[in-house]
Image (tube, rainbow, N blue to C red):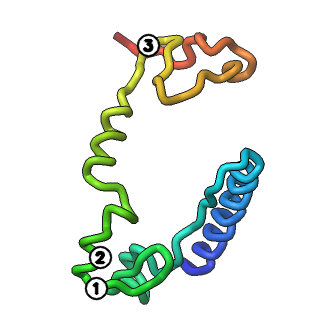
Amino acid sequence: MNEVLRDSYMEDCENCIARWNRVISEHEIPYQLRLPVRRFHRHIGAYSGGRFDPSGHRLSDERWNERRDEFLPSEKDVAYVRNLMVPVMEIGKIAHWLAKPTNGIHGLPFEFEYVRREQ
């Protein structure tokens, strides 16, 4: 059952990537997104004991450790994202990495106090 669900998930991801790649192409950006093969960075299943790059090539543990930060977020990347993810709790304010919605829920203004917190 897990593999059936995984197949469906991968198909959905492939459809999203295809849409994003069309937009990238329309903007004449010379880059294409792609999903890694199923063997890449597995912790369960038949490939869980192996080391593979995103294209599916087997790597030794030594080579994996040398190239890991090419494939996965580094500690520096994680620290950078954590630095960005500062919560914003004020009514009518929004985190700087998010775009303000054009309107609120059910046509209410964005600044509407949707959740009231006891002080």
Say whether residue 99 is left or right of residue 66. right
> Label 2: few (<14), some or many (≥20) within 10 Å?
some
Q: Say which of 119 and 31 sits in front.
A: 31
Residue ID at (60%, 11%): 112
Label whose residue precedes the other's in the sequence (3 or 1):
1
Cα gap from disc 3 to disc 1, whole angstroms:
50 Å
Say whether residue 65 is left or right of residue 112. left
- Outermost residue, left side: 62
> Cβ–Cβ below 8 Å for labels 2 and 1?
yes
Q: Is residue 66 above or below residue 51?
A: above
Residue ID at (28%, 85%): 60
Q: Which residue carries the number 2 mark? A: 64
SS of the residue under disc 3: loop
Amino acid marked by disc 3: Glu
SS of the residue under disc 1: loop
Residue 69 position in % (x across, y down): 32, 62
Q: Which residue carries the number 1 mark? A: 60
Q: Which mark is residue 90?
A: 3
Please identify the quarter of the rendering in which residue 48 is found: bottom left
Amino acid marked by disc 1: Ser
